[in-house]
Amino acid sequence: MTPPKPQPRPDRVGLLEYGRRFRRDILSAQPARLYRAWMAEFRTPFFRSYMMNDPALLDLVLKQRPDDFPKSDRVREGLAPLLGRSVFVTNGEEWKRQRRIIDPAFGKGRLRDAFPAMKDAAAAMVTRLEEGEQEVEEVASYAAADVIFRTLFSVPIEDRLAAQVFRQFRDYQRTQPLLNLAALIPLPRWVPRLHRRRTLSAAAAIRGSLAALVDRRREEIAQGTAPDDLATKIMTFADPETGHLFSPEEMVDQVAIFFLAGHETSASALAWALYLLATHEDFQERVAAETPVDWDAFDLGQLSRLPLTRDVFRETLRLYPPVPMMVRETVQPEVFRGRSAPKGAQVVLSPWHLHRHERLWENPDGFDPLRWSRPQTADSQRAAYMPFSTGPRVCTGAGFAMAEGVLLLSRMVGAFRLEPVGPPPVPVAHLTVRAQDGIRLRLTRRISGGY
């Protein structure tokens, strides 16, 4: 069974119709030729955009000269009410300073420290679930939020403030796409930018609750009672070059992106992985057979004993990358594949198209976890696989995300047999790649194994 994807638009369509399609869903708005093109240029009287699938261009933008292709301010316009000036949206020296403070918290040995909290969240997930029909995007969201609260603030999602943030974020996530129309189709600077009242209200509520969590932790640090978790590490680590510590406001900005990156993206990937296994029973049973019998004794080093589960999660990230597109901007005139690009042009990098590119992958739309054990896949992986971006701006929590995804997936499939319910879900881009009407599965508790 081929996993579902949106029906791309015809290769030629007018700007007005493109705008209408884009407002509904950025994935189905893109033309079919982008799944085989190395580059596409989009021109209007106001701007130019370049969608890039050529591995050489990706390497140029993300690795060789990343400072010449900063993140577009237009991306920040849509997310600023929630993320402020977090590490996700900043550039230049500000971004470098933020990364110097944040990266040590995710460094060597930190994942091992955080893994017991991930295990506790996974155990809580299968304990509270019941048999029967479930909307698994909601299940995955709750579990992923539990992981981020336990690893970041050492509290379960049932904590009053944590539960409050989760409810508020659920209200926010479908009101604001990760990429709005102005990000990929930049409007003239004189056109006013409007945020929906509901979006602004939800973002303000989330930031208020996050600020309460940060304030609570600051008091614990002052009293010497703070746990040694990610929040404490980040709040107490000074920039080694300047001695700067994050202010309370800056810390709220960073916690907001940690929650977005550590919750929304992980939930998206887990939900699609569950769906793919529900529709591929052979792989589901093989993953179930790989599940550990003694979870109490399971530690981070034993994740290597789950190679198929890892490859299922890798393949899910290929087919349904949580962040489907990224936008950079040129700071000077450039030439891309013989085309002249002016200063201020948009550079669109799309893991969604890159991961399904017909020239770069064998059976690009097929679910094939075994491809990751075939030698020829290594070339495709190096050239065309970037679910966490790549280069200096690679996601600092990529290792955390992979460990979490494999752990939660193994725990769920070891505890429950999964069956699809209803029509296939249609992927659309909200904050991350989600199903248009949710993902419904029937869960049946297994008699033994993994739980």
Image: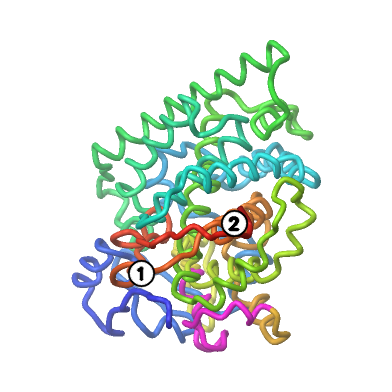
The local crowd at label 1, few if under 14, some if 14 to 19, many if 20 or more residues have their Cα within 10 Å, is many
Cα–Cα span, label 2 and label 1? 24 Å
Q: Quadrant of residue 102?
A: top right
Q: Which residue is mark 2?
A: 405
Q: Quadrant of residue 135?
A: bottom left
Q: Is residue 89 visible?
A: no
Q: Secondary structure at mark 2?
A: helix
Residue positioned 51% across, 79% down in the render: 367
Residue type at mark 2 is Gly
Left or right relative to 441: residue 162: right
Query: Residue 418 at what x, y percent from top left?
Result: 46, 65
Residues shaded magenta: 350-372
Query: Residue 346 at what x, y percent from top left?
Result: 44, 64
Against 158, residue 133 (above or below) is below
The local crowd at label 2, few if under 14, some if 14 to 19, many if 20 or more residues have their Cα within 10 Å, is many
Left or right relative to 173: residue 113: right
Return the mark for residue 248: none
Query: Residue 16 at what x, y percent from top left?
Result: 19, 70
Q: Which corner quadrant holds the N terminus?
A: bottom left
Residue positioned 69% across, 20% down in the render: 226
**Label whose residue precedes the other's in the sequence (2 or 1):** 1
Prevailing secondary structure of the magenta residues: loop
Residue positioned 56% across, 30% down in the render: 250
Query: Residue 400 at what x, y percent from top left?
Result: 66, 50
Specify how the rendered protein is coloured: rainbow
Residue positioned 57% across, 72% down in the render: 285
Residue type at mark 1 is Leu
Please name which of the two marks, 2 or 1, marks the residue nearer to the observer.
Answer: 2
Left or right relative to 156: residue 444: left
Return the mark for residue 27: 1
